[in-house]
Amino acid sequence: MARFLIVDGHSAIFSWPELTELHRRRMVLARDALIQKLTQYQDTSGTRVVVVFDGQGGERSNEASTPGGIQIFYSGSSVTADSVIERLAAAYGHTHDLTVATNDVAEQDTVTGFGANCISTEILHGMIESAAADLQRDLKKHRRK
């Protein structure tokens, strides 16, 4: 069974100091840095990643950063990222190995009720850092051969 990770984008940005600092300078820099980290995590872990951001002020949209890249959703002006995450969890929580990363306790309770697993964005940050360190170790081993 494929594993999926849904990330509350702004929850991650505001809980990771390096992304919060980028956000202070320019919001798009923080979003791009998060997308880059999540793409690398997807590539190294094999977990399909979806990130959801509160909208751009228009209609709800979704885009893939690159073919095979992570899926990115921006909620519309009348919808929150939380409601998009809840809909995804309701649709796929009981039929897929689904984990949601958010620091919103109410959101965690809701998606758990739909059958998804939940982690904080701090735990996700640790998972991403660990996967990156594992990749670096593997690359060093490969270079020595």
Image (tube, rainbow, N blue to C red):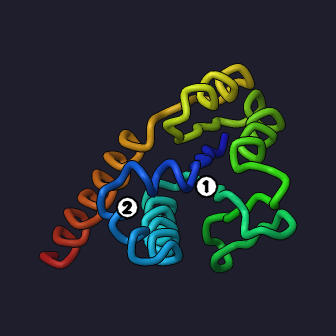
- Residue 56 spot, x, y in % from top left: 72, 69
Is 36 left or right of 99, judged from the image as shown?
left
Res 66 quadrant in image: bottom right
In what quadrant of the picture does the N terminus appear?
top right
Give the residue at mark 2: 20
Q: Nearer the viewer, residue 93 or 113?
A: 113
Is 77 left or right of 85, judged from the image as shown?
right
Residue type at mark 2? Thr
In what quadrant of the picture does the C terminus appear?
bottom left
- Residue 7 spot, x, y in % from top left: 57, 49
Q: Is residue 113 above or below residue 59?
A: above
- Residue 83 spot, x, y in % from top left: 77, 42
> Are the residues flagged by discs 1 and 2 in contact, CB closer than 8 Å?
no
Tell me if mark 1 has few (under 14), some (14-19) or many (20+) residues whose alpha carbon lies within 10 angstroms of its own.
many
Residue type at mark 1? Arg
Give the residue at mark 1: 48
* Dot 1 or dot 2, earlier in sequence: 2
Residue shown at the point (37%, 39%) measured from the top left: 123
Q: CA distance from mark 1 to mark 2?
A: 25 Å
* Label 2: element kind: helix
* Label 1: element kind: strand
Residue shown at the point (12%, 76%) measured from the top left: 144
Tell me if mark 2 has few (under 14), some (14-19) or many (20+) residues whose alpha carbon lies within 10 angstroms of its own.
some
Discs 1/2, front: 2
Res 21 quadrant in image: bottom left
